[in-house]
Amino acid sequence: MAETPGATTRLLSGGGEAEASVYRIFSRPEWAELRANTPLLLGEADLTALRSLHEPVGLDEVADIYLPLTRLLNLHVNAARQLNQVTDSFLGRPAPAPPYIVAVAGSVAVGKSTFARVLQALMARWPDHPRVALVTTDGFLHPNRVLQARGLMARKGFPESYDLRRMIRFLASVKSGAARVEAPVYSHMSYDIVPGETLVVEQPDVLIFEGLNVLQAAPATVVASDFFDFSVYIDADETDIARWYLDRFLWLKRTAFQSPQSFFHHYKDLPDDAARETGAEIWHAINQRNLHENISPTRPRARVVLRKAANHAVREVWLRQV
């Protein structure tokens, strides 16, 4: 691969072991140059519908960060299809190319959901892979009744709170080209799995699989990351993530928590100072701990790391070289 002017190589270690990964580090302007002639096919109205109100993403971010990434992903998708054709020729039996699976990982409140939705919309505009599905791991959380019975409600989002067998079966079915695969649906309003409701995935060209712990290498024969072709980790300084979480908690108190259907309706009348204190307690007891123990140690496994600045804008892109 040709050297990119200005880009540097950095050795990063993580996971609490001697494991190390080599990344080439791109500043935002350096990464933006790699867009080449990739067209911007999203407008402001499209972006408004895709982003969360508390996660600002502008068209400049799409042009500088997302478009080079979609160009890279498109090259990887086409290369994977060519490799699949080689295998078909060897076996003497043509078969449809399996879906290309892109994992998106990172902390609570770091902006994974907005990133995944915008990425889905952009990738679906490439003529080579118009069918792009998006599934979040929230749907694979155990229902609250199971978590309550196991004493795990305070560890929702930790690895043990997920139905990992069902998640693996889902990914295996999608990757094998099954015509119709169903995923459970999670409601952030009720804070629980929606009984009887499923999300149907029908042979997508690309599947974006987004969640906290998707890159974790659990002690199992088969793990979720075995099915991934590409992975992105959304990263930021922990102090910024904590602030974003608290800002979001206050925003939800004024909006979603006001609904009687909200699991967190009992927080609706908290004064802002008390709400901020409550949010900080939740962050430190649950989300920060999960970040330290399970999420950030998986960062060195990602193919691309997007490093955000305090204003949510991506300031650096780390591209894994080995």
Image (tube, rainbow, N blue to C red):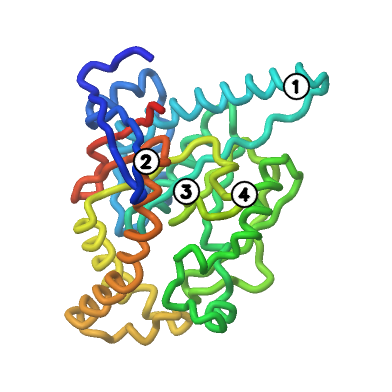
First reached walking from the N terminus: tag 1 or tag 3:
1
Provide the secondary structure element on which disc 3 rests. loop
The quarter of the picture where residue 45 lies is top left
Judge depth for marks 3 and 2 and give the one in front.
2
Residue 92 visible in the displayed image: yes
Q: Which residue, given by chain and number where applicable, does mark 1 sit on?
A: 88
**How far is mark 4 from mark 2, CA to CA?**
20 Å
Q: Nearer the viewer, residue 290 or 134?
A: 290
User: In percent of the image, x 42 and y 35: which residue is there?
Assistant: 303
Q: Nearer the viewer, residue 303 or 56?
A: 303
In the rendered structure, the answer to whether residue 218 lies left or right of residue 58 reads: right
Percent across and percent down for residue 218 are 52, 54
Q: Which residue, given by chain and number where applicable, does mark 2 sit on?
A: 19
* 40 in relation to 218, above or below: above
Q: Amino acid at mark 4?
A: Val
First reached walking from the N terminus: tag 4 or tag 3:
3
**How far is mark 1 from mark 2, CA to CA?**
35 Å
Residue 215 numbered tag: 3
* 153 in relation to 13, above or below: below
Q: Amino acid at mark 2?
A: Glu
User: In percent of the image, x 36 and y 60: which residue is there?
Assistant: 293
Most distant residue in the top direction: 2
**How far is mark 1 from mark 3, CA to CA?**
29 Å
Percent across and percent down for residue 95 are 77, 28
The quarter of the picture where residue 163 lies is bottom right
User: In percent of the image, x 65 and y 60: which residue is there?
Assistant: 166
Q: Which residue, given by chain and number where applicable, does mark 4 sit on?
A: 222
Quarter containing the N terminus: top left
Q: Amino acid at mark 3?
A: Leu
Judge depth for marks 4 and 2 and give the one in front.
2
Percent across and percent down for residue 242 are 24, 62
Q: Amino acid at mark 1?
A: Asp
